Image (cartoon, rainbow, N blue to C red):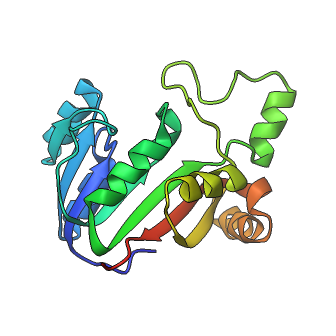
Amino acid sequence: MLTIRNGALLDAGCGPGFAAEFFAARGFAVTGVEPAPSAAREARARGITVIEGDLASDALPPGPFDVVIALEVLEHLADPITALAALMRRARPGGEIVVSLPNEWHLLRRLALLLGAEPLGGAEDPHLRHFGLRSARRLFAAAGAAVRAERAVGIIPPWCRAADAAGSALARLAPRLFGLSFLFLVLKEER
């Protein structure tokens, strides 16, 4: 999904640093932002530069960054629109912003809810916002972000190789039903 192959990357809500470590190993100069001190410590142990703080606060480094990522983060925030707008300001003109959001309404989750599963998001790390494809698109529009590409990630885990191809095909055909999460690419306009 990314066309930019190196440069400065901001990992917003980097957690324990798994994605940051992946991008650092591929040549990006990664800076993470993480509000949870224990997760920030774990990311630092992976060699990632991490700033502890809230995404909607002044904790975000000024940038500019070539790439800004927020993977499975905005659903945890009370005001994802403000946070997304702040992240967009950190990208350089022509920079790329990649956001992933969970599809709270995929088929397996719907079945689990019908069978009495707990509310969406879990008790230890609750989702304050619940996104499907339409509400995700509304989020981007409200933040003034133009989505350049979007992709559904299938509900079948990649380690189920035989079924993974079928799951990916189903996610392309019916993303609202068979997409576990959605990836969005937003390009910051040149000015």
Q: Residue at x 25, y 56 (%)?
A: 10
Q: Residue at x 17, y 49 (%)?
A: 61
Outermost residue toward the right in this view? 114
Left or right: 163 as drawn, with respect to 31: right
Give the image location of residue 16, x and y in percent: 29, 38
Give the image location of residue 93, x and y in percent: 28, 74
Give the image location of residue 105, x and y in percent: 75, 44
Q: Is residue 155 visible?
A: no
Outermost residue toward the front in this view? 191
Q: Residue at x 23, y 25 (%)?
A: 37
Total marks in image: 0
Determine the image quadrant of residue 3: bottom left
Q: Is residue 35 above or below residue 174?
A: above
Q: Is residue 167 above or below residue 34?
A: below
Q: Is residue 152 above or below residue 46?
A: below
Left or right: 151 as drawn, with respect to 108: left
Give the camera-side residue of 59 and 75. Answer: 59
Determine the image quadrant of residue 24: bottom left
Give the camera-side residue of 154 and 105. Answer: 105
On-image quarter of the C terminus:
bottom left
Give the image location of residue 54, x and y in percent: 30, 33
Q: Is residue 43 visible?
A: yes
Q: Residue at x 34, y 50 (%)?
A: 86
